[in-house]
Image (spheres, rainbow, N blue to C red):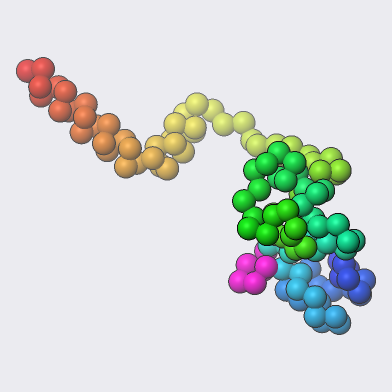
């Protein structure tokens, strides 16, 4: 069972706020997103991966005391192992996501065919 980062009481994994100290643990409206809070006087940004590589778009940067995108640069992050996809599956997934582009390409192709006649 996880513990609250502030008061260290056990809490349910799905809890949005700690029932003991009322600390917000999950982002409002998005119970699956964790809210990270600075526990020391230094803001979160100085130890965040996104601040280091300058890809952070958080408006409170570089003085953010809480953040939902925080990734600690001192922890080893495991790369996500994506399953191997064959070319056929890749093409099928791409075509499902890009069906409007495929329609435009088909219209251009048939226009060129008609123009060549």
Q: Is residue 96 visible?
A: yes
Q: Is residue 31 magenta?
A: yes
55 to the left or right of 34: left
Residue numbers of the magenta segment: 27-32
* Rendered location of residue 56, percent (x, y): 66, 48
Task: In the rendered view, tell whether residue 68 sits above or below residue 9.
Answer: above
Q: Residue at x 86, y 82 (%)?
A: 20
The residue under the point 85% across, 44% down is: 75
The answer to whether residue 1 is visible is no
Quarter of the image where the N terminus is located = bottom right
Q: What is the tally of numbered marks visible in this picture?
A: 0
Check the picture and name the quadrant holding the C terminus. Answer: top left
Q: Which quadrant would residue 99 be assigned to in this image?
A: top left
Seen in the picture, residue 33 relative to 98 is either above or below; the reply is below
In this image, 71 relative to 40: left or right? left
Q: Residue furthest front?
A: 63
Residue at position x 84%, y 74% in the image = 11
In the image, 116: left or right of 77? left
Residue 95 lies in the magenta-colored region: no
- As drawn, the residue found furthest toward the right would be 8
| Residue at image location 82% in from the left, 48% down from the top | 47
Q: Quadrant of residue 14?
A: bottom right
> Magenta part mainly helix, strand or loop?
strand
Q: Is residue 74 above or below residue 109?
A: below
Residue 87's spot in the image, x, y percent?
Answer: 50, 26
Q: Residue furthest left?
A: 117
Where's residue 70, x and y in %?
A: 74, 53
Viewer-nearest residue: 59 or 1:
59
């Amino acid at each position: 069972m996880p513990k609250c980062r502030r008061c260290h009481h056990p809490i349910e994994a799905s809890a949005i706020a700690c029932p003991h100290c009322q600390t917000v643990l999950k982002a409002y409206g998005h119970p699956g997103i964790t809210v990270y809070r600075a526990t020391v006087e230094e803001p979160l940004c100085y130890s965040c991966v996104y601040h280091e590589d300058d890809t952070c778009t958080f408006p409170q940067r570089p003085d953010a005391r809480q953040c939902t995108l925080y990734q600690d640069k001192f922890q080893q992050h495991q790369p996500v192992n994506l399953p191997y996809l064959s070319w056929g599956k890749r093409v099928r997934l791409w075509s499902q996501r890009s069906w409007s582009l495929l329609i435009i390409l088909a219209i251009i192709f048939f226009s060129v065919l008609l123009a060549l006649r």
